[in-house]
Amino acid sequence: MTVFADPAKYQYSTCEGLRRQRQTWMNKEQELRQLMDRAEQSAGGAVVNLLAYKGDHVAASEELQLIEQDSREKNCDSGANWPSSSAVR
């Protein structure tokens, strides 16, 4: 069950499209995690996290879960087997 993400969003995506989306959402989630960690260090950081970052972080996590699920259903290479965007081809 997802709150922010549409379960059918990636239904017609190709494995290559899923790879690109996965990288985009991983970067977004990492950026939000860093912002949340930085906010935790200041006074009132928990409130800032809840109001400013938590919803976006949950949405990014849900998107990643959907991408992983669809990539498994389509038998795409996933996880550690996915080539990074910086790989030399």
Image (spheres, helix red, strand yellow):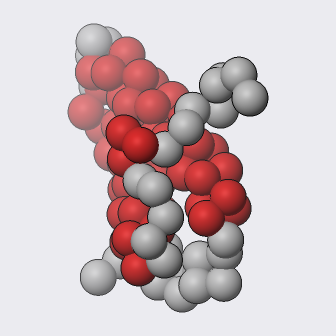
In the rendered view, tell whether residue 5 sits above or below residue 39. below
For the point 42% across and 53% down, which residue is it? Answer: 78
Q: Is residue 75 left or right of residue 88?
A: left
Q: Position of residue 49 (x, y in %)?
A: 35, 37
Report whether 17 appears left or right of 45: right
Please give the name of the residue rendered at 41% of the width and 22% of the height, measured from the top-left corner.
34
Q: Is residue 64 visible?
A: no
Q: Is residue 83 left or right of residue 69?
A: right
Badge count? 0
Residue 86, given in percent of the width and then of the height, sits at 66, 24
- Name the quarter where the C terminus is drawn: top right
Residue 67 vertical position relative to residue 19 in the rendered view, above or below:
below
Residue 6 placement (x, y as % from top left):
52, 81
Q: Is residue 22 visible?
A: yes
Residue pictured at 25% horizontal, 33% vertical: 46
The answer to which image quadrant residue 37 occupies is top left
Pick the residue in front: 42 or 59.
59
| Residue at the farthest right position | 89
**Frontmost residue, 69 versus 48:** 69
x and y percentages locating residue 30 in the rendered image: 45, 31
Above/below status of 33 relative to 54: above
Quarter-of-image position of residue 58: bottom left
Location of the N terminus (image quadrant): bottom left
Query: What residue sits 67% from the left and 58% below the top?
Result: 16
